[in-house]
Amino acid sequence: MNRFLKKGVLVHSFSDKSGCVFLDLHSGETLSVLMSKTEIFKVLSGEMRFDQESEQSIAIMSLIQKNIFMPLENKNTNV
Amino acid sequence: MSDNYFIDLHPFSFSVRTYIPQVIQNLSTIYGSRFKKLSVEVADYELSVQKSSGLRSFIRPQARFFCDQQEPFKPLSFQKAYAFLEWGMNWTVAGNEVQHVIIHSAVLAKGNKAILFPAPPGSGKSTLTAYLAHNGWRLLSDEMALIIPQTKTVVPFVRPICLKNQSIDIAKQLFPDGKFSDIAKDTHKGDVIHLSPPDSSWENSTNTAELVGVVFPNYRANQTLQIYQLDKTQAFMQLVENAFNYGVLRDVAFSTLTNVIENVQTFEIFHNDLAQVAAFLEQEIIDYE
């Protein structure tokens, strides 16, 4: 997987499998995605693919744009 | 000359400095023995409602609201002074309280089981609240749910029910013995009246209840009861939109509300019959477990 969950982001995947919610503790913003946490990580790792126009792809793109998932090269491995 | 009064509510108390007879009379009607002259009590919040001074007080008198000596709002017309105080009390708690996660929502309970009714103005929330409170349910709040962090326990904050426009006539017909305030006319919400909750709600105003449901009500004059089960992600996001102090409590509010949503039933309803709604709530949520 070429992305990682930014530090300071809380995630909750609901038990009815309706989706996942993210709270960015820095910005205070809360986002929801109608996919389970497992599905999101599968998409980010390339294990699962959706059409680029699909709601799922758009939702994951929005998480990336909001810096919920950061590029792996941004990870400070010395810390 | 202003006098100091004390409103002894759970879990917050207020001191109110005023000399406006309309305010004093309405507070006495609505809060009964919980409203008294301040003697040695120390209130959580110091409020004041005063008539504007100067030439304006003769031409077009206005009421001014103060909280802890700050004036957060522009004055309103004098005739709205009591409603102004009630809204000011809501604002004071919503803006200062951080020991609970606060949701803009009515809360009613049967026994120890409570349901949240978050809803925007015009949804018929307060009419439903008034109906349930006078038909065997216990009112915990018409305006704000106080949830203890990391639990699904709701702390009562019993206050009057704020009814608007057409709901005023409906409520006066349904509850002829109800204790109503004067009508505040032409507010930003239209005509507004406050209705004191029944004695049973006041008597249980220190008893917490456990959440078992979250229901988003919508009154539609031409629609029979329609019930939609909300998925948990939708319900959570709607609850966040209605949370007053979510931005302040952040992780505490997030974990509290996810925990609540995981452990309750969640519905959106459309209706034009209060009795049908009450039957649904009892059969499908309260008696479900």
Image: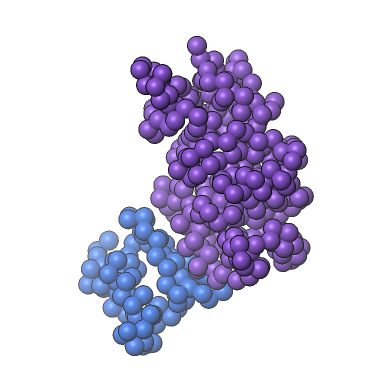
Chain colours: A blue, B purple
In x, y percent, where is residue B224? Answer: 66, 68
Residue projecting furthest to the left? A73
In x, y percent, where is residue B214? Answer: 60, 60
Query: Which quadrant of the structure image shows residue B225?
Result: bottom right
Q: In the image shown, does B220 or A34 lie closer to the viewer?
A: B220
Which residue is at a point 69% across and 58% down the rendered structure image?
A: B274
Q: In the image shown, does A70 or B18 lie closer to the viewer?
A: B18
Quadrant of image for the C terminus of chain B: bottom right
When the figure is inspected, residue A62 is found, relative to residue B29, above or below; the finding is below
When the figure is inspected, residue A16 is found, relative to residue B4, above or below; the finding is below
* Left or right of A12 in this view: B222: right
Q: Is residue B187 visible?
A: yes
Query: Which quadrant of the structure image shows residue A15?
Result: bottom right
In x, y percent, where is residue B59? Answer: 39, 22
Which residue is at a point 49% across and 61% down the rendered structure image?
A: B238
Residue projecting furthest to the front? B59
* Left or right of B62 in this view: B131: right
Residue projecting furthest to the top? B1
When the figure is inspected, residue B243 is found, relative to residue B95, above or below; the finding is below
* Left or right of B174 in this view: B14: left
Which residue is at a point 69% across and 28% down the rendered structure image?
A: B32
Which residue is at a point 24% across and 65% down the rendered structure image?
A: A76
User: How many marks are shown on the rendered structure?
Assistant: 0
Q: In the image shown, does B181 or B212 lie closer to the viewer?
A: B181
Q: Is residue B147 visible?
A: no
In x, y percent, where is residue A45? Answer: 34, 82
